[in-house]
Image (cartoon, helix red, strand yellow):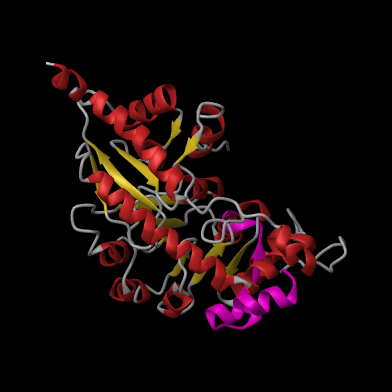
Amino acid sequence: MSVPAYRSQEWLFDVAAGRYDVDLAVSGMEAHSVEPLLAEMTTKAGYDVDRGAGQLRETIAELYRVRPENVLITHGAQEALYLLYASLLEPGDEVVARGPGWQQTLDLPARFGATTKTVDYDLTNGDADGGARTAAAVGENTRMVVLNSPHNPTGLTFDDAQWEPLGATKTLVVNDEEYLTDFDRSVVQHVPGSCSVSSLSKVYGFPGLRLGWLVGPSDVVEKCVNYRRYTTISNSPLLEDLGLAVLRRRETYLAEYRRRLTDGWRVFREWATGHPQLQPLEPQGTPYVFCRVDLPETTSLQLCNELLDRERLLLMPGDVFGAPGHVRISYARPADLLTDGLDRLGRVVKSLSGLELAELT
């Protein structure tokens, strides 16, 4: 069966391509250079171990306080999620997921004969009962619950209490933890037998390495390893060398990331007080903010297209996540770039609000 068009990728690589100079859309740190890491590369470009190099797996296992056999190195978090669906789902199974959200989770299970039941985020109360409502959606045919905390695009994050009802379901719980910096808060510390996926893309600023991982029960890892033998076989040992060098400098990258979050949110919050047409949902540890758009006769998608046409500014319309009426704005940017982008955004918002005409009269 065919799969639906991937809306977020279409927006970035087709619709917006060549139309912007300032990017407040991509949801991680800007890409870092690999040049400082090259001196540590010693590996030859042969086939890699299908589950990932031992030293890299050991390093990630230490972060999660698990054993190396609970770790699989993958081509980004997205391959880790794909392997879970492909290895575990069968026709008639059900996946419980959250909406709005990442299209891979919402649409891809159908490719394997499964159905997806969506539990919407409650944006009026910070999704305080999200864990309980998600657990209540688990039924007899539910094969897995797929979550994303810290969440893309809303920026909301489960606290410890939110995990408790999910642990009681006795169903495989998978959490996409791309934006988690403290793995003591990982799902694997809260829900027995659960799986975490993450990567070096968002927090560390190395999306081009395509290096991610799956942490979970050893039997789940082995099923995923067997499936990938039919597809990508293994990772590049050269990229795994670079990934290990990144993790050896982990605290340096995390310090920069946290500084960007603190400084960028202060700049954005000050800007937002003068622009009530965009109503932000305060992020909880993510480098982006989710805003409701309140503009007369202007949809969120129209706003994002106007920004491209008038100001060459790129934002992510909530429409690509199934959340029309919202935009996602990445604020963990260098101060001058963020200020420039917000100035451009402010001019268009002001124009679409009719404020320019009001000031003239």
Residue drawn at (65%, 51%) of the image: 208
Whether residue 172 is visible = yes
Query: Which one is in front, 54 or 44?
Result: 44
Q: Residue 199: image x %, image y %?
A: 58, 62
Q: Is residue 34 above or below residue 297?
A: below
| Range of magenta residues | 52-78
Which corner quadrant holds the N terminus? top right
Q: Main secondary structure of the magenta part?
A: helix
Q: Residue 63: image x %, image y %?
A: 55, 78
Question: Is 129 on the left-hand or right-hand side of 50?
Answer: left
Query: Which one is in front, 174 or 23?
Result: 23
Which corner quadrant holds the C terminus? top left
Query: Which one is in front, 308 or 196?
Result: 308
Q: Is residue 255 above or below residue 118?
A: below
Residue drawn at (25%, 41%) of the image: 292
Whether residue 176 is visible = no
134 falls in the magenta region: no
